[in-house]
């Protein structure tokens, strides 16, 4: 039994049954609500979804581990435009998990810190704030001050989280149950086969348990973006970090709620910074940041953005990195036959597939529409709808995506595209998206002030662009 120092339910049955029971009740309740609405009770289905969504978010929030991580992932993909729109209530409820995860008791946090670092908090820090500034699926973050005066953020892992998550990752039915609820709520033929990409998802989530691994990720990104004019990366404090505690220099800035109230020019600047960070790291190196949600961003009034969570990072094999950049270039240039060939080479489908060059371009062009649209582009709900339709809303038996298989290396690349669009939409961003991808690939000079600063930094650092010259047609 879980005790006060181990508050998470353990074991495959104990982790699966609450969600499975909730899902079964939700499916039955949705049917009853539908019948009531047909009988003349207006709004019965909407009210059912509102009630169920609140309970579901609470269940995931207290489950921690993979359940809450899955809820956070789904909350960043706005699926209200697919199916019957029934999942919009769940998306709104799940979005609260980004900032309002239930925290652990301060005394318990201090116990974890002392056990991991071998010293009490008072010896490590001159000041330590008991109340966490953020609480998430695996750990929570506290403000502190080192004895040399540096402001830091201290991430502390929940007791029992590692064991619970490892059990979850071995329990494929848990994730399958989660997606069945999404399908049931949306009333669509949403493709939801977690086994297809289970290995890749499990690998990334498992790495988030290893704070030493995350510290190495932070250092790698810090080295890559050393001296960057508008991308900020924290510095790891090695002497105050361990297996379950990670201390980094504190990056100040507005949070997501405050950022949305800023003037539009500043929001456009932040949007371009985010865009360049998300697509830039795998243009200049093999690194890819796989957790794009605004709780991980700190928005500076000077236009800079800080990125503060590096638990979910994919290191792309060089062959796949280059092929993916070439695939993006073929999409931007409208080279349909090259696009089909590259998708075969990267593992989306076999060469003898019935998918035509027009079929695959239809899907990828919807996902990357902002590259081929008249410039500049303003991100709206239509942006999200197009991307969702391309990858998820596949009720039609003839939808090309039904004949594709997402390569393991690209699972989080696709997720990032689906999650970045809602962020840019919330900011109401207007961007020269085509120019950004062009100058990142090295096929054109930048036209924006940020682009020119970035290009100068790339030249100063001697970094490669996304494509080698012989990769160009």
Image (cartoon, rainbow, N blue to C red):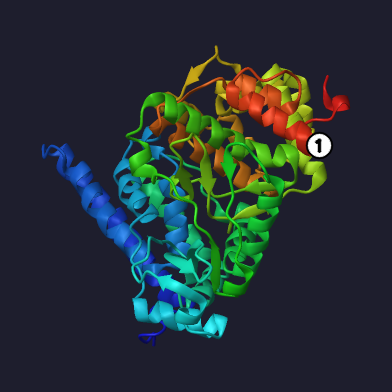
Residue 121 spot, x, y in % from top left: 46, 79
Furthest-right residue in this view: 470
| Residue assigned mark 1 | 462
Seen in the image, is 335 located left or right of residue 378?
A: right
Q: Secondary structure at mark 1?
A: loop
Q: Residue furthest top?
A: 374
- Quarter of the figure that contains the N terminus: bottom left
Farthest front residue in view: 148
In this view of the protein, can residue 353 be seen by the observer?
Answer: no
Q: Write down the quadrant of residue 28 in the picture.
A: bottom left
- Residue at the spot x=47%, y=59% of the render? 69
Quarter holding the C terminus? Answer: top right
| Rendered view: 455 above or below 444 | below
**Left or right: 261 with respect to 362?**
left
In the rendered image, residue 107, in percent from the top left (x then y), is placed at 36, 81
Q: Position of residue 457 (x, y in %)?
A: 71, 34
């Amino acid at each position: 039994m879980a005790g006060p120092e181990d508050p998470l339910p353990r074991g495959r049955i104990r982790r699966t049954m609450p969600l499975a029971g909730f899902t079964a009740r939700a499916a039955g309740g949705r049917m009853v609500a539908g019948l009531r609405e047909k009988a003349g009770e207006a709004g019965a289905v909407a009210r059912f979804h509102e009630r169920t969504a609140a309970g579901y978010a609470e269940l995931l929030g207290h489950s921690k581990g993979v359940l809450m991580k899955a809820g956070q992932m789904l909350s960043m993909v706005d699926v209200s435009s697919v199916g019957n729109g029934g999942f919009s209530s769940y998306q709104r409820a799940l979005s609260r998990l980004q900032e309002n995860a239930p925290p652990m008791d301060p005394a318990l946090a201090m116990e974890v810190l002392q056990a991991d670092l071998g010293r009490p908090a008072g010896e490590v820090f001159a000041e330590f704030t008991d109340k966490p500034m953020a609480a998430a699926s695996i750990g929570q973050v506290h403000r502190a001050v080192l004895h040399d005066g540096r402001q830091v953020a201290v991430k502390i892992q929940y007791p029992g989280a590692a064991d619970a998550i490892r059990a979850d990752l071995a329990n494929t039915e848990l994730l399958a149950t989660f997606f069945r609820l999404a399908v049931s709520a949306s009333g669509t033929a949403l493709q939801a086969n977690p086994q297809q990409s289970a290995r890749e998802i499990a690998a990334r989530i498992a790495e988030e348990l290893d704070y030493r691994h995350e510290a190495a990720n932070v250092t790698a990104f810090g080295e890559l973006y050393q001296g960057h004019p508008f991308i900020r990366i924290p510095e790891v404090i090695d002497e105050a970090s361990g297996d379950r505690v990670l201390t980094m220099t504190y990056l100040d800035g507005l949070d997501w709620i405050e950022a949305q109230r800023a003037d539009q020019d500043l929001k456009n600047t932040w949007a371009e910074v985010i865009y360049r960070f998300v697509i830039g790291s795998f243009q200049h190196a093999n690194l890819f940041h796989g957790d794009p949600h605004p709780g991980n961003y700190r928005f500076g009034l000077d236009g800079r953005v800080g990125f503060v969570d590096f638990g979910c990072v994919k290191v792309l094999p060089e062959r796949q990195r280059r092929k993916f950049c070439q695939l993006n270039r073929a999409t931007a240039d409208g080279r349909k036959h090259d696009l089909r060939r590259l998708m075969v080479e990267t593992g989306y489908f076999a060469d003898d597939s019935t998918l035509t060059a027009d079929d695959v371009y239809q899907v990828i062009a919807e996902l990357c529409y902002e590259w081929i649209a008249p410039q500049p582009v303003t991100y709206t709900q239509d942006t999200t709808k197009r991307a969702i339709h391309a990858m998820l809303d596949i009720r039609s038996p003839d939808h090309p995506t039904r004949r594709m298989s997402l390569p393991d290396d690209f699972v989080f690349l696709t997720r990032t595209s689906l999650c970045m669009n809602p962020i840019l939409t919330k900011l109401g961003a207007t961007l020269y998206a085509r120019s950004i991808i062009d100058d990142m690939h090295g096929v054109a000079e930048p036209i924006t002030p940020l682009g020119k600063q970035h290009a100068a930094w790339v030249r100063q650092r001697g970094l490669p662009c996304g494509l080698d010259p012989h990769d160009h047609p």
